[in-house]
């Protein structure tokens, strides 16, 4: 191997190692942000606290995430990737509105229970999140409502649609299952009965 080839190989190795090191640093920052968002809440999480937990400087955090939106997106994406997310496309395949609502709420309530701590803090602090993050969370909730409501006659009249939205909300699950101590199954049955009673 010539000197030029050895030099090129060494440079390639150094570049790969630098990229790997940067990737590991970025991952530590994201994991630190996820931890803090899930323990103190996004609104109380500072860049300084993230840097300290990740073992890096604030400047390093900014090098990887130049603005709050980029950091929130990485944090949210990482947390969501570790969850078993609701599957509205599966509920949408169910034609009967009561059966679809039952399946959808059961899936949502399972997700809420599994992610309760993070969801509690994020929903509390959502007002402080960057616009793209808040819009993404709201769009996700809107998608759940659309799928659940569209199975009903006349695409769910306003009152029924509002009740379905209430039934699908994380705050409703917390009220029924944490404060009133219903099981998820009991809460689903109560909400399905309530939606079915609208207009009767």
Image: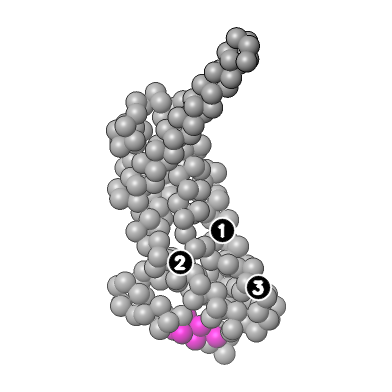
Residue underneath mark 3: 92
Residue span colored magenta = 189-196
Circle 3: element type: loop
The front one of 16 and 133 is: 16
In the picture, measured across the screen, residue 125 lies left or right of residue 142, that is: left
In the image, what residue occupies the spot 30% across and 78% down? 181
Camera-near label (1 vs 3) is 3
User: Relative to the observer, which residue lies in front, 65 or 68?
Assistant: 65
Q: Which mark is residue 140?
A: 1
Locate residue 198, reporting x and y percent.
Answer: 55, 84
Q: Circle 1: is it few (<14), some (14-19), or many (20+) Cα within 10 Å?
A: few
Which residue sits at x=31%, y=77%?
180
Q: How far apart are the two marked residues, 2 and 3, measured between alpha carbons?
A: 17 Å
Q: Residue furthest front?
A: 1
Q: Which of disc 3 and disc 1 is earlier in sequence? A: 3
54 relative to 160 in the view: left or right:
left
- The x, y position of residue 102, in whole percent, is 53, 81
Q: Residue at x 39, y 46 (%)?
A: 34
Q: Is residue 63 magenta?
A: no
Q: Using the image, determine if residue 166 lies above or below residue 95.
A: above
Give the prevailing secondary structure in the magenta stretch.
Answer: helix
The number of numbered discs placed on residues in the rendered structure image is 3
SS type, badge 1 = helix
The residue nearer to you, when weighing 124 against 10, is 10
Mark 1 or mark 2: which comes first in sequence?
2
- Quarter containing the C terminus: bottom right
Helix, strand or loop at label 2? It is: helix
Nearer to us in this view, 73 or 189: 73
Left or right of residue 23, residue 101 in this image: right
The label on residue 111 is 2
Cα distance in 3D space between marks 1 and 3: 15 Å
Q: Is residue 12 left or right of residue 170?
A: right
């Amino acid at each position: 191997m010539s000197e030029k080839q050895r030099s090129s190989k060494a440079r390639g190795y150094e570049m790969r190692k630098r990229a790997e090191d940067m990737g590991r640093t970025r991952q530590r920052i994201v994991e630190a942000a996820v931890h803090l968002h899930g323990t103190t809440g996004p609104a109380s999480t500072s860049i300084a606290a993230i840097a300290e937990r990740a073992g890096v400087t604030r400047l390093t955090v900014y090098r990887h995430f130049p603005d709050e939106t980029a950091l929130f997106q990485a944090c949210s994406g990482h947390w969501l990737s570790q969850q078993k997310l609701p599957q509205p496309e599966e509920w949408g395949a169910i034609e009967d509105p009561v059966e679809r609502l039952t399946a959808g709420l059961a899936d949502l309530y399972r997700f809420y229970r599994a992610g309760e701590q993070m969801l509690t803090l994020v929903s509390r602090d959502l007002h402080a999140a960057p616009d793209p993050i808040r819009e993404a969370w709201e769009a996700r909730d809107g998608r759940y409502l659309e799928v659940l409501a569209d199975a009903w006659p006349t695409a769910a009249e306003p009152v029924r649609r509002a009740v379905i939205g209430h039934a699908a909300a994380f705050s409703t699950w917390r009220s029924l299952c944490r404060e009133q101590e219903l099981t998820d199954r009991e809460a689903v049955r109560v909400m399905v009965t309530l939606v079915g009673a609208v207009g009767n």
